Image (cartoon, helix red, strand yellow):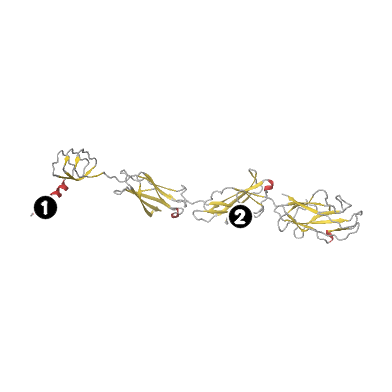
Amino acid sequence: MEDCDHFVVGLFLLLLILTFVSAPISENYADNYLVTDGGGESMDSVNFDTSLVGGIISGGSSSDNYINQLGVFYGLNSPPNNPVVSLNTSSGDNITSDNLLCNAFVSDINDNGIKVYIKWYLNDALNLSVEYSGVASGTNFSAILNSGNTTKYQVWSCGMRLYDGIEYSDWVNSSNLTILNAAPVVTLSFPVDGSSTIDRTPLFNWSASDADDDSMTYEINITPYYGNNPSVLDVRYEIGMIASNYTPSLDLQLLYDNGYYYKWKVRADDGEVNGSWSSDWSFNISSEVSISMIVDEIYFGNLAIGESNSTEEGLAPFRLENNGTVLVNVSVNASSLWTSETSDSEYYQFKVGNVSGEEGSFDWAGSITSWFNMPLTAYVVAVNELNYSDDSDSVEVGINMTVPSGESPGMKSSSIVFLAELAE
């Protein structure tokens, strides 16, 4: 029977707990009562004294004299604010090499820590879901989708929802963003900017990249300059090249010796769009003047007074070869052959001619191709514009001599100097 009484009391207390659901306002709860309440907006009593208030006190409790009471306080919760979601790319160009950024300002009125849920959509189909924990309220948040996930012409969007540990915001989606074709980019390699070379057909080399891995063709522009002014004299322009290098088929003509230099640039085409021109790099071509003697000595043997001999009588003439990179004029000067003739005379002559198989190596009309008195005091241009191409770069210099009537017997010799100078 005693157990039964306990059961009744317990039941009565339970009924009290379920019954007191409004906010009690009383000035005098007597001792030894258990007051329970399911919560309300304001518990406004000035004399909860030595009573046990068992329940939830929510909202703004305004009593100056809660003594020895038991209460559990909590504030009213609101869900996080719905985010305003935008989608952009790391460079703003919306190309394949860009990361995608799903952005929003995240906030919660209760200033709770926020979990952010992101959904990535590819062509309107869910592609990837990601969660981010511990995001602070009142901050700008960006979820990043790395560029390796995207390809040109794909359409992407993102959705975002916030959770404060109790409640969720709505799902909010961004607008669509289309991945665009990326224009190819060219980087020059050599000739290096500001460099000098003697090579008149230098190799031009560059590298190129395309974020979409498209096949590319190339366009090169090589323009000469005199000072700050471009020249139209020797512009080179090629388009549709497959290789990322170029060698001119004809020699570049304008030399740094004459005040000229070149600028070059390249751009690439991926089949849809031309990329931007690369930066301009400058270089110059300097002359290399160099000749060598293939035949450098002639011996005429014994001659009598008044007797003549020449390289047309079976002796090998001098032979010169242009080993440089430019057209040259070759001038002649010699020491006196005869002691009795110390001035230019018909007793010591020269002329130039073609080497067999290399006809046309020099300007015939501007050269001395008939017997001419050997200059003993000054230089005379003997060969005009001797070429430097390997298959056409040689000239013969013949010698004709007659022993003067007043010449004394003995060994006779003369040293001939061939002076090469730039002819361009």
- The residue singled out by tag 1 in the image is 6
In the visual, does 236 lie left or right of 172? right
Q: Residues within 10 Å of mark 1 (few under 14, many from 20)?
A: few
The foreground one among 421 and 79 is: 421
**Secondary structure state at the residue bearing disc 1:** helix
- The residue singled out by tag 2 in the image is 246
Compute the Cα span from label 2 to label 1: 104 Å
The foreground one among 7 and 182 is: 7
- When asked about the image quadrant of residue 68, the answer is top left
The picture places residue 114, in percent across and down from the top left corner, at 33, 48
**Secondary structure state at the residue bearing disc 2:** strand
The picture places residue 421, in percent across and down from the top left corner, at 74, 50
Residue for point 11% across, 51% down: 8
Q: The disc labelled 1 sits on which kind of residue? A: His
Residue 187 visible somewhere in the drawing? yes
The picture places residue 153, in percent across and down from the top left corner, at 45, 53
Q: Residues within 10 Å of mark 2 (few under 14, many from 20)?
A: some
The picture places residue 110, in percent across and down from the top left corner, at 30, 44
Counting residues from the start of the chain, the first of labels 2 and 1 encountered is 1
Q: Examine the rendered structure and indicate whether residue 43 appears above or below residue 188.
A: above
**Residue 327: mark in rendering:** none
Residue 171 visible somewhere in the drawing? no
Tell us which disc is closer to us: 2 or 1. Answer: 1
